[in-house]
Image (spheres, rainbow, N blue to C red):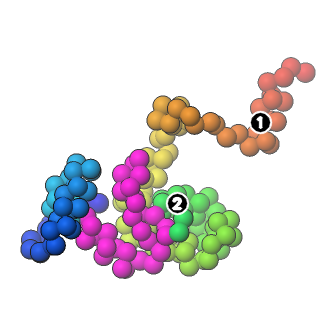
Amino acid sequence: MKSAPSTVISMRLPAASGKRLKRMANRHGWTPSDASARLVEEGLRRSEFAFIDFRDSSAGRQACLQGSTLAVWEVMLLVHSYQKDVSAVARHLKWPEAKVQAAVNYAGAFPEEINEALAENETTDFTALKNMIPQAVEFVPARTARKRNAQASPR
């Protein structure tokens, strides 16, 4: 989430909540003020958009779809691959259309966030992924594997 003009709002937290906030801030390399601002923003977004949650990932905090492992940008990758056919994506994921539409709505409200994640995904090839996750194994669909083998074998 990008910085924008801000306002100062003072609040009191129970001591235990303050300690937890400081631990979270330290874990992410944020100040407690940054962590509290982020949590408030995420809470507001959760209340404004159905099915949206936020999770830590290797790419940082991301908007995700509740009850799934998918980030909003990943759902949008599917939406684009299905020519923006929300019904087709819902069938593919075996989700209600409303859940896919929630991702579309969120992406529409925060296009810079989602487009940045999509662009980052475009620049990550298997070699870069293998460097980050040494146990990664490249998945090659059977059809593609047969095609590669046919092209590689002399006739």
Find disc 1 in the rendering and name its residue: 145
Residue displayed at 64% across by 66% down: 93
Classify the position of the N terminus by image quarter.
bottom left
- The image quadrant of residue 147 is top right
Q: Are marks 1 and 2 in contact (CB under 8 Å)?
A: no
* Badge nearest the viewer, 1 or 2: 2
Q: Is residue 28 magenta?
A: no
- The reply to whether residue 113 is visible in this rendering is yes
Direction from residue 124 to residue 96 in the image, left or right: right
Residue displayed at 59% across by 60% down: 78
Direction from residue 106 to residue 137 in the image, left or right: right
Which one is earlier in the sequence, the residue at label 1 or at label 2? 2
Which SS class for mark 1? Answer: helix
Residue displayed at 90% across by 21% down: 155
Q: Nearer the viewer, residue 149 or 95?
A: 95
Q: Could you classify mark 1 by the number of other residues whose Cα lies within 10 Å: few (under 14), some (14-19), or many (20 or more)?
A: few
Percent across and percent down for residue 99 are: 55, 75
Report the Cα–Cα distance between label 1 and label 2. 27 Å
Q: Is residue 30 above or below residue 102?
A: above
Which SS class for mark 2? Answer: loop
Callout 2, which amino acid? Leu
Percent across and percent down for residue 18 are: 17, 65
Q: Nearer the viewer, residue 62 or 152?
A: 62
Q: Residue 70 shows which numbered tag?
A: 2
Magenta segment = 38-66
- The image quadrant of residue 80 is bottom right
